[in-house]
Amino acid sequence: MSPTESAAASGDSAADSPTDSATAQWYRHFGSFDAPGSSPCYAAWAVGISGDAELIRRIDQWPHNKRQPLLILAAARFLGAQVSPYREFRTFLDDRWTEVSEIVLSRSTQTNEAGRCAALLPSLAQISAVEGRPLALIEVGASAGLALFPDRYGYEFVGARADADAAESGAADAGAAEAAEARTTRLVPAGATPGTFPVLRCVTSGPVPLPAEIPRVAWRAGIDLNPLDVRNPDDVAWLEALIWPEQEFRLERLRQAIAIAQERPPLLVAGDLNEQLVALAGRAPADAALVVFHSAVMGYLDAGGRSRFRRTMADLAAERGCHWLSNEGHTVTAQADGSNVVPEMDDARLRGRFLLLQDGQPAAITGPHGQSLEWL
């Protein structure tokens, strides 16, 4: 049975107009809102796919959780697809479709963006300071666990106005450069040699509670359905393929973060986060402030899974004093019944960005890769 016949047999209205289907809209949204400004190549590829009826039909043959834009794009990059116009990319997909499909069906989008630690650091520092204790970290949806090392990275927080002034004036304006420098907060990990750690740059706005120093982490662990091993070359290659094209700085940052994780790989537990979290939390040292956090993970859970996770976090807060940092896109607010967790948040403000919730309360709007932090 052909893809079109299969869709028709299932009663899928997308068979009549694939480019109006939910899958096509998903790609169109990614190409129009999420990718522009970060990767012109991915923006063009995603928009191209959204209007390509035959390709949409092929993608719709995969399970729903395998149809996401980043997965097919990363699979193609893993196989060697280079930055190119959509027509050339489409030819690449035709030539390597069987291999692309195999990777899509066997892998998942486990982007392990160390840069997100910059968006989380002020909250982590606040928690550590209030508790008067070092941190015990659990990341759900941890991939290779690179976000579990916020204490091993350097940071450069730049005020939004300073960043704009520097861009407008250029390096020749010494006065603007000095003003920008005065509005920049730099933090480095204790005892680290310059050049051995990534420096995470984040543009800030609003009353961000920037810490004077990086909080200490006493224990770290993660949960993932399929943890990636930083000592496995194939897993490392997949992590590199998940970096968006035209973002060489992220690739270099990833490699530096991997080198740090390779020194002492974190504890990573394989399994469903709702099945593993309570037991793993029980292994955290009692003399540390426990923080469970996640970024771009809730979209992979259905409504029941998210509800169960929220109940688990409420129980851990009551029984253990556990803190919760949720750094997610639209899926963090939209509920199955049509309501919103944060009804006062204008959805338009979150397009292409994440909402950071600290213990259930909106704290900031963040760049999806930690590149910006707008404190609320």
Image (cartoon, rainbow, N blue to C red):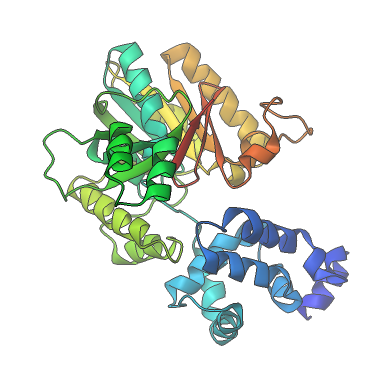
The image quadrant of residue 229 is bottom left
At which x and y percent is residue 179? Answer: 31, 35
Q: How many marks?
A: 0
At which x and y percent is residue 375? Answer: 49, 27
Residue 38 visible in the current orientation: yes
> 222 or 128, which lies in front?
128
Q: If the image is split into quadrants, where does the C terminus sit? A: top right
- Residue 233 lies, with reference to residue 345, above or below; the image says below
Q: Residue at x 47, y 48 (%)?
A: 225
At which x and y percent is residue 361? Answer: 56, 21
Q: Left of 210 or right of it: where is 307?
A: right
Q: Residue at x 49, y 62 (%)?
A: 107
> 306 or 324, which lies in front?
324
Q: Left of 44 or right of it: where is 83?
A: left
- Residue 269 lies, with reference to residue 246, above or below; the image says above
Q: Left of 118 or right of it: where is 244?
A: right
Residue 149 visible in the current orientation: no
At which x and y percent is residue 239? Answer: 38, 60
